[in-house]
């Protein structure tokens, strides 16, 4: 792998490592939602249609463990404790604004050519 390409049957291929960052259905959606800036979990629940509280919590924990998301205290409140705020780490920003954004654009550009076995592309967008 000296030239940066993957050899057949190599388990530690960089492509596999990158693909694992988006292997959970909601992880790339959470990363994309956090591109808008630091956000509380409740706001993420509102922003991301269709995700449950449990699944969002699991996604946030996975993304934190991978170093893509940072959890910190909220700012600006003086009388009550500010809830946790989630934001992209520098690594998360580079991924969300780079390859993930390009992948999303590619999917949008080629939506008509993608075959969707599960019918997900045929569903109307949530209102």
Image (tube, rainbow, N blue to C red):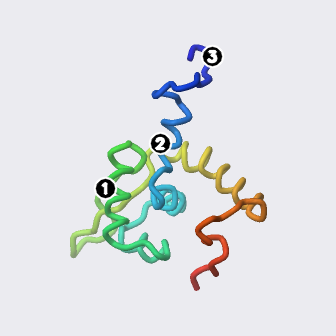
Question: Which one is in front in this view, the residue at disc 3 or the one at disc 1?
Answer: 3
Residue at 49% over, 76% down: 49
Residue situated in front as seen by the camera: 46 or 79? 46
Q: Which mark is residue 3?
A: 3
Query: Mark 3 or mark 1, which has the lower sequence index?
Result: 3
| Labels 1 & 2 near each other (Cβ < 8 A) | no
- The quarter of the picture where residue 111 lies is bottom right
What x and y, as percent, mark residue 48?
48, 72
Q: Residue at x 28, y 68 (%)?
A: 83
- Earlier-in-chain disc, 2 versus 3: 3
- Residue 56 on image: x %, y %: 37, 65
For the image, the number of numbered tags is 3
Label 2 or label 3, whichever lies nearer to me, is: 3
**Does residue 85 sit above or below 89 in this rendering?**
below
Residue 88 is labelled as none
For mark 3, give the secondary structure.
loop
Specify which label sits upstream in the sequence, 1 or 2.
1
Disc 3 crowd rating (10 Å Cα; few below 14, some 14-19, many 20+) is few
Residue pointed to by mark 1: 72
Label placed on residue 90? 2
Residue at (55, 42) in percent of width and height: 94
Distance from Cα at disc 1 to Cα at disc 2: 14 Å
């Amino acid at each position: 792998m000296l030239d940066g390409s993957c050899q057949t049957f190599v388990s530690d291929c960089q492509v596999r490592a990158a693909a694992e960052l988006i292997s959970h259905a909601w992880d790339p959606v959470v990363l994309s939602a956090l591109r808008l800036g630091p956000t509380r979990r409740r706001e993420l629940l509102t922003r991301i249609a269709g995700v449950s509280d449990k699944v969002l919590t699991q996604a946030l924990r996975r993304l934190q463990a991978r170093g893509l998301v940072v959890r910190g205290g909220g700012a600006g409140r003086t009388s009550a404790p500010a809830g946790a705020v989630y934001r992209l780490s520098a690594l998360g920003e580079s991924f969300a604004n780079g390859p993930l954004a390009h992948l999303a654009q590619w999917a949008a550009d080629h939506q008509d050519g993608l075959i969707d076995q599960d019918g997900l592309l045929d569903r109307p967008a949530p209102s």
